[in-house]
Amino acid sequence: MSQLTCRDVVDFLIDYLACELDPATRVEFDAHLASCDECVAFIRSYEQTIRLGKAAFERLDEPAEQRVPRALVDAILAARRRV
């Protein structure tokens, strides 16, 4: 395989994060990251997005009233009835 491009990094990102790249591709991926600050920033941003997305759904089984002020819930429900 020739030297990886930034587009290749995006294409291989899921496999990279899951540690599923073949060894040769992993070496080239890591070499690209060693010289491309933009891809490193992109990967860090992607990982942060995944962490925040997971955190947003950690407490789905809790009743909303425990996390959202009752007045806000009532206002949302009243606005939906008006539509």
Image (cartoon, grey):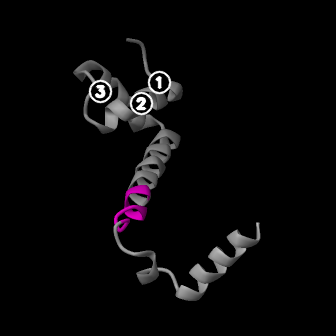
Measuring from the top left, give residue 50's x and y in whole percent.
Answer: 41, 51
Measuring from the top left, give residue 62's x and y in whole percent.
Answer: 35, 73
Q: Report the Cα–Cα distance between label 2 and label 3.
A: 10 Å
What residue occupies the far front of the structure in this picture?
Answer: 81
Question: Residue 26: which disc?
Answer: 3
| Three-letter amino acid code of the residue under disc 3 | Arg
Number of marks: 3
Say if the magenta span includes residue 6. Answer: no
Mark 2 or mark 1: which is in front? 1
**Residue found at x 53% / y 42%:** 38
- Residue 19 higher or lower than 63, as above or below: above
Disc 2 crowd, CA 10 A, few/some/many (<14, 14-19, 20+): some
**Residue found at x 43% / y 56%:** 53
First of labels 2, 3 by sequence position: 3
| Three-letter amino acid code of the residue under disc 2 | His
Instruction: From the image, tell me which residue sits under label 2.
Output: 32
Q: Report the Cα–Cα distance between label 1 and label 3.
A: 12 Å
Tag 2–tag 1 contact (CB < 8 Å): yes
Measuring from the top left, give residue 77's x and y in whole percent.
Answer: 63, 75
* Left or right position of 79 against 69: right
In the image, the segment drawn in magenta is: 53-60
- Mark 3 secondary-structure assignment: helix
Instruction: From the image, tell me which residue sits under label 1.
Output: 8
* Left or right position of 11 against 29: right
**Residue found at x 69% / y 69%:** 80
What residue occupies the far right of the structure in this picture?
Answer: 83
